[in-house]
Image: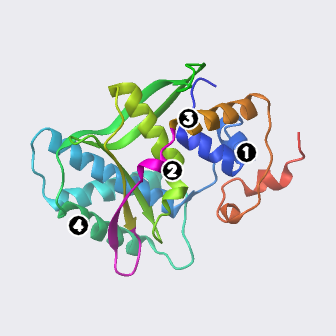
Amino acid sequence: MDHLSASQMNLYFQCSLKYKFQYIDKLPKPFKASGLIFGSAIHSAISWFHKNQLTGRNVPVEKLFSIFNADWYGQKVESVIRYKETETETALLLLGRELLNLYYHQPKALVKGTEVPFTVPLVNPRNGENLRMNLEGFIDLLEENDSIVEFKTSVKTIDLKDVNLQLTAYSYAYEMLYGKRPRNLRVVNFLKLKKPKMISLEAKNGTIDHQRFFNLAEAALKGIRSGVFFPRHSWWCDGCEFVEPCRAWDGK
């Protein structure tokens, strides 16, 4: 294990056995959920759009649609897509266009960076203790006003509690990189509804606790290094790629 990420921490806390299957055993995934494919294609299109903004180029919205479609079909070639009962590929492609059109025409702040990578040490803010493990990841969007923006797709409005760990990881990384906390932490939530919507959710300062994040990172590392892995049965099991190895798991 050479680094830790917010997504690894989230997965370990959600289901440590799935973490083991994915990151340690590296089991092949028999399929990808359509929601993951959709979210990835939206991210790719938006990132491409912001890269053009950084170079001062204006791009037509139709090009944004083309990037979305290309990413979708690229993933389709590499993976089997599992759709929900009410979904079709055609409907999802149309939905993606509608959501990207909403984003394209909204007012925007100046862009400082897109898909910004970071590698920072995990250090206790209180006493300087270093876990000797780096935190790594990517920030979807940095705006010139010191704002961090994360993009999420979902079928209902995101509860900020569910993304607090991820936002706190970005806030921690930003402070390590720039010597100050971000001014704002915002989630742009693309809602996959019959009438698509896009809403902006801002995290409250009191919910961003770097000390608690360090404590959680330390606990996750301790559990992973100690080989503590077990299934957690919940609604996450629906659509899990590792249903079969989970059923076959014998506790060893």
- Residue 16 badge: 1
Between the residue at mark 1 and the residue at mark 3, the CA separation in whole angstroms equals: 23 Å
What secondary structure is marked by label 4? helix
For this view, does 64 lie left or right of residue 148? left
Q: 219 and 136: which one is in front?
A: 219
* Amino acid tagged 2: Asn
- Residue 137 badge: none
Occupied quadrant, residue 138: top left
* Amino acid tagged 3: Gln
Of mark 1 and mark 4, the one earlier in the sequence is 1
| Res 88 seen here | yes
Q: Closer to us: mark 4 or mark 3? A: 3
Of mark 4 and mark 3, the one earlier in the sequence is 4
Q: Position of residue 137 (x, y in %)?
A: 46, 35
Occupied quadrant, residue 153: bottom left
- Residue 101 badge: 4
Q: 222 and 62: which one is in front?
A: 222
Q: Closer to us: mark 2 or mark 1? A: 2
Occupied quadrant, residue 152: bottom left
Q: Which residues are magenta?
A: 191-209
